[in-house]
Image (cartoon, rainbow, N blue to C red):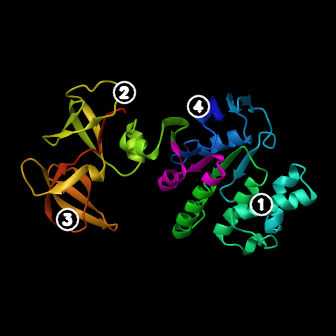
Amino acid sequence: MAFLELDGLTKRFQGHAAVDGLSLSLERGEVLALLGPSGSGKTTTLRLLAGFEAPDAGRVVLEHRDVTDLSPVARRFGMVFQHYALFPHLDVGANVAFGLESRGTRGAELARRVQEALALVDLVGFERRPVANLSGGQQQRVALARALAPEPAVLLLDEPLSNLDPALRERTRRELRALVHRLGITAIVVTHEQEDAFDLGDRIALLRQGHLEQLGTADELYATPATAFVAAFIGRASEVAVRVVSAGVAEVAGRAWPVRWGGAMPAEPGAAARLLVRPEGLRLVAPSGDALTGRVTDRRFTGAVAYFSVETESGLVLEVAAEPSAAHEGDTVGVAPAAGGLHLYPVDG
């Protein structure tokens, strides 16, 4: 049996289901990233886990024990809030001690636990610093130390990196990943940023309107998206209206392209369908009858790879990943499928 289970969790606000029958399970020491757009139910799920909200249906089970009706303190879940929720009138040590004191820890034991928590996040010696004098990254680490000090069974993090600038965000993400894995603590991270989810999560649960769209590793969600929403949300993709030839072939502007069928039902030859095309699923070639001919309308340089927008003669606009020197704006090029990266779904999928 799993270490932590979400069993059919449902939460409604004014008749709207923010979380709708969500079921997930985590093994001990696993890090799960809850990913999704705004309004997908990520933060509500975290609040249900923490005990800040009561579900309308469903259970939270920790180590075979139903903790759904327990208070936040009793269920031993540590929480790092999006805006850290530090007390500005208290110094670093007092902020870290707050959760321990609420659980009755006092004296020498309190001082020891505070020191141990600060050591985990490399803030030893900061005990008397006002939190207002800390950088954003340091405040994030204080919030993390406060959550870790009571030795929680599960660590919950709500958009823990959203307030950091890009350079600091990347460094802090690496440090957070290393710390969580070193501690071996079970953790759930809420984020709307794919890069954070890919870096931090052993697995990713992609939510949409309170439902679980797909659960898997970053590789699985990217390479084998279960739905058109997953294919469009994860990574980059151009969407093209096409006709089904077979489960493995689609007609794209008169050309037969190899595809991966992602529909739940068998592909129906001749039916209209949606083709989600990864930029690396296409390649630039010399114009020919076998390729779609088009004009490069935009080129975005990102380093080793550039992304070329190509408007084809048939009116399709496709994004192609290629070497930066492969073409220039205004060039006439051919576009052909590469290996993989083309995902076909029913129109209503």
Percent of width and height locating residue 41: 58, 41
Q: Circle 2 sits in a helix, a strand or a loop, which is it? A: loop
- Asked whether 333 or 103 is in front, the reply is 103
Residue 116 - label: 1
- Give the labeled residue for mark 4: 23
CB within 8 Å, label 1 to label 3? no
Q: Is residue 277 left or right of residue 131?
A: left
Mark 3 surroundings: few (<14), some (14-19) or many (≥20) residues within 10 A? some
Disc number lying in front (2 or 1)? 1
Residue 257 - label: none
Give the residue drawn at x 56%, y 37%. Answer: 210
Res. 254 visible in picture: yes
Sooner in the amino-acid sequence: mark 3 or mark 4: 4
Is residue 58 depicted above or below 276 in this figure? above
**Amino acid at dot 1:** Glu
Mark 4 surroundings: few (<14), some (14-19) or many (≥20) residues within 10 A? some
Disc number lying in front (1 or 3)? 1
Disc number lying in front (2 or 3)? 3
Sooner in the amino-acid sequence: mark 1 or mark 4: 4
**Amino acid at dot 2:** Ala
Residue 264 - label: 2
